[in-house]
Amino acid sequence: MRYDALVVGGSFAGLSAAMQLARARKKVCVVDAGAPRNRFTAQSHGFFGQDGVPPLQMIAQARAKVLAYPSVTFVEGSAVAAKADGAGGFTVSLQGRDAPLSADRLLLAFGVQDGLPDIDGVRERWGTSVLHCPYCHGYEFSDRRLGVLFAAPMPPDHALLIAEWGPTTLFLNGNADAVDGETRQKLQSRGVTIEPGRVVGLEGSAPDLAGVRIDDGRLLPIDALYVAPQPRMGSPLAEQLGCAIDDGPFGPMVRTDAFKATTVPGVYAAGDIAMPFQNATRASSDGVLAGVAVHRSLVFGA
Ligand SMILES: Cc1cc2nc3c(=O)[nH]c(=O)nc-3n(C[C@H](O)[C@H](O)[C@H](O)COP(=O)(O)OP(=O)(O)OC[C@H]3O[C@@H](n4cnc5c(N)ncnc54)[C@H](O)[C@@H]3O)c2cc1C
């Protein structure tokens, strides 16, 4: 079977795109490996009408709605290779499956995965008490003791933002020169404590956090620590296909035009891999735009 569109990634962006294509009565196949970026957190926040719902539940509900359309196929698995088929479409091979899938259009929505600071205790608290986005999880730690782990390129004055939610300590982690005089003054006048020492580990009963251990032996009590993860593409498919990839403000981004077309004709991209300032709402909206664009390209040409 040759599909009209093949969507790689069945989460916020991919399922939102597939919904538009399904409602346009196109034959769509969604391939998904089942590891969305926010799977580490118990509750997703801020999504229209779904505040506080577990992310895997949100995705399962969305998948069921999309699969209610008869022209949609869902394949659980991982796409490992994609190439143009020489007839205007694409073939995609899946891990452990002999026959490749083929489609006229390819929509990449495979998300990013986060590289975390190499500090003892970070990994097991990620998404619970080690956080990256105050708009996603800051409210739950209102007025608690907050920390910000400095790491370039995040500017140290990021701590000013976090201080909106509670008393904040900026952990310079040995980078004493990272804060100039003016920034130091701003931080201090906002009540941010600056801790210059190197962080050696997080302590407490994980996934909760009790404190941050400094290399001189002190344990500073903290309830939540904000870190800057290093996002990387969830799959090499965009590179394989020859899509241009740019350095975004928070990591690599597949280059797309205003209608989510990549630099390779017939290939579209949506969600965290194709936009800065990522969250689930924005990924879903990006997917809607991409789904409509893919449909229009099937009608009017790529
Ligand atoms: C800890 C944490 C908490 C967060 N909390 C919130 C929150 O509260 N509110 C909010 O709005 N946002 C939150 N976010 C951000 C949110 O997770 C992302 O913006 C959103 O998941 C992006 O959606 P996406 O569809 O682009 O990618 P994802 O949701 O990451 O989905 C990508 C999908 O593609 C699949 N995939 C990857 N490679 C392949 C492949 N080769 N073949 C097949 N499938 C593949 C993956 O398995 C995954 O299912 C959080 C992020 C993190 C890290």
Image (cartoon, rainbow, N blue to C red):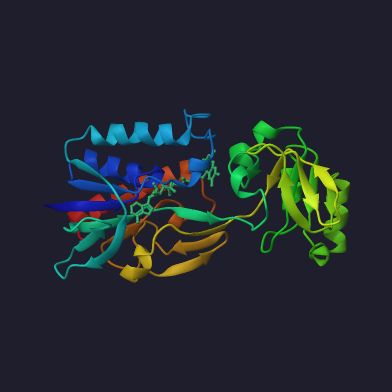
Residue 5 in view here? yes
Which image quadrant: the C terminus? bottom left
Residue 157 in view here? no
Q: Which image quadrant is residue 265 in? A: bottom left
Q: Residue at x 88, y 55 (%)?
A: 185
- Farthest residue, direction left: 1
Q: Residue at x 58, y 42 (%)?
A: 127
Q: Is residue 156 above or below residue 36?
A: below
Q: Which image quadrant is residue 21 in? A: top left
The one of 209 and 247 positioned closer to us in this rendering = 209
Q: Residue 286 vs residue 216: left or right?
A: left
Q: Residue at x 75, y 38 (%)?
A: 210
Q: Residue at x 38, y 64 (%)?
A: 236
Q: Position of residue 17 (x, y in %)?
A: 32, 45
Q: Is residue 267 above or below residue 34?
A: below
Q: Residue 23 vs residue 269: left or right?
A: left
Q: Which image quadrant is residue 2 in? A: bottom left
